[in-house]
Image (cartoon, rainbow, N blue to C red):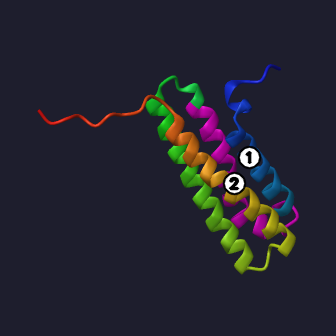
Amino acid sequence: MARTQFEELKVYQLAEELADAIWAIAKTWPVFVRNTLGNQLFRAVDSIGANIAEGTGRGSFQDNRRFIRIARGSLYETQHGLRRAYKRGLLQSEDITKLKTLIEELGPRLNAYLTSIGPRHSVPKDK
């Protein structure tokens, strides 16, 4: 299967890496935790990459920018879920280190990608 445009983006690859890292950790949690916090966390983290992919397929700069903003919101939701998991003793120190490194790279890359999309908007001059 040929790679699509979004799969070539480093920001998308990082989103996938974060999602896979969280999956590897959370799939070992007890059933109740996986079915509550785990499911919400999986949906949030998978939404980051899904929105990057959907934005690239929409065909307009405006739509792409909107979906990147949604992806950024999903990253924040993921961070919230990870904070809850940490407070509840579900994450090991090595988990925290790995996830923090990925999040600290992904956030700025999402912002940079957002600003790179589409033509620059000029401010209209007063007449």
Residue picked out by circle 2: 105
Magenta portion: prevailing SS class:
helix
Q: Percent x, y for residue 6?
A: 67, 31
**Is 125 above or below relative to 71?**
above
Q: Answer with the quarter of the image where residue 5 lies.
A: top right
What is the quadrant of the C terminus in the image?
Answer: top left
Q: Residues within 10 Å of mark 1 (few under 14, many from 20)?
A: many
**Is 7 above or below relative to 23?**
above
Q: Residue at x 76, y 51 (%)?
A: 19
Q: Percent x, y for residue 107?
A: 62, 54
Q: Are marks 2 and 1 in contact (CB under 8 Å)?
A: yes
Q: Percent x, y for residue 75?
A: 61, 55
Residue 118 seen anywhere in this rendered image of the structure: yes
Q: Residue at x 76, y 69 (%)?
A: 33
Q: Secondary structure at mark 2?
A: helix
Q: Residue at x 51, y 22 (%)?
A: 59
Residue picked out by circle 1: 14
Nearer-the-camera pick, 73 or 90: 73
Q: Which residues are magenta?
A: 26-55
Q: Answer with the quarter of the image where residue 34 lies.
A: bottom right
Q: Secondary structure at mark 1?
A: helix
Mark 2 or mark 1, which has the lower sequence index? 1
Amino acid at pointer 2: Glu
Q: Is residue 54 magenta?
A: yes
Farthest residue to the top: give it.
2
